[in-house]
Image (cartoon, grey):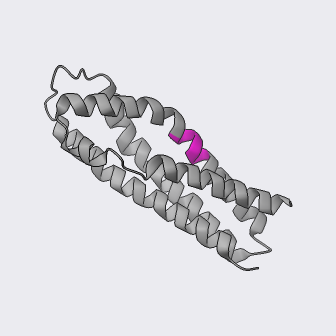
């Protein structure tokens, strides 16, 4: 297997892993409807996992995307453009995460489920709106990766 193909496969795998971690919402409806204590407990558990997992997956998806795009630039400029688009969508999701999710999650870590915090619903709404946008960007990244993978040389 040549380097270009290996990078393309690594990019597909990293993007698929990021998509699997971010896009499914098995508890989304419950989280959005939860009262303060349940919401805080859920978000603190999710944050404990995602603050370790998401950065690694994001770097892997964006990095392998750019590497595969560079490797394919001469042999398949179209696939290279789609992989670059994928990496840019992941970068957009990272920017959104850093600007919205990280500050909200940092505050949420200090909350006790037993003591309702004034304004928590506003924080939840802000986090949820940004999460919808982040999920859309990750889906866009996955779609770009899929298009790049299906191109005929």
Residue 48 image position (x, y, % from top left) = 43, 29
Q: Quadrant of the N terminus?
A: bottom right
- Left or right position of 32 against 104: left
Residue, x 79% and y 73% (percent of image)? Answer: 74
Residue ranking furthest to the bottom: 152
Q: Residue 47's quadrant in the figure?
A: top left
Q: Residue 117's quadrant in the figure?
A: top left
Residue, x 57% and y 44% (percent of image)? Answer: 57
**Foreground residue among 67 and 45:** 45
The verdict on residue 58 being magenta is yes
Does the rendering let one see residue 81?
no
Residue 139 image position (x, y, % from top left) = 47, 61
- Left or right position of 11 against 35: right
Residue, x 19% and y 44% (percent of image)? Answer: 33
- Left or right position of 67 against 61: right
Q: Residue 67's quadrant in the figure?
A: bottom right
Q: Which residues, given as a range, are shown in magenta? A: 54-59
**Foreground residue among 45 and 116:** 45
Residue, x 18% and y 31% (percent of image)? Answer: 36
Residue 102 image position (x, y, % from top left) = 39, 37
Residue ranking furthest to the right: 2
Q: Overall secondary structure of the magenta stretch?
A: helix
Does the rendering let one see residue 61?
yes
Residue 31 image position (x, y, % from top left) = 26, 41
**Foreground residue among 16 and 98:** 16
**Foreground residue among 26 and 46:** 26
Q: Is residue 56 above or below residue 134?
A: above
């Amino acid at each position: 297997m040549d380097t270009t193909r290996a990078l393309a496969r690594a990019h597909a795998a990293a993007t698929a892993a990021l998509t699997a971690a971010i896009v499914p919402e098995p508890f989304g409806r419950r989280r959005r409807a939860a009262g303060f204590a349940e919401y805080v407990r859920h978000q603190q558990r999710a944050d404990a996992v995602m603050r370790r997992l998401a950065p690694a997956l994001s770097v892997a998806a964006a990095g392998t995307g750019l590497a595969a795009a560079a490797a394919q630039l001469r042999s398949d400029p179209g696939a290279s453009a789609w992989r670059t688009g994928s990496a840019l969508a992941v970068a957009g999701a990272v920017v959104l995460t850093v600007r919205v999710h990280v500050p909200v999650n940092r505050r949420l870590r200090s909350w006790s489920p037993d003591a309702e915090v004034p304004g928590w619903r506003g924080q939840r709404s802000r986090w949820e709106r940004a999460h919808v946008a982040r999920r859309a960007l990750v889906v866009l990244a996955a779609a770009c990766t899929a298009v790049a993978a299906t191109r005929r040389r």
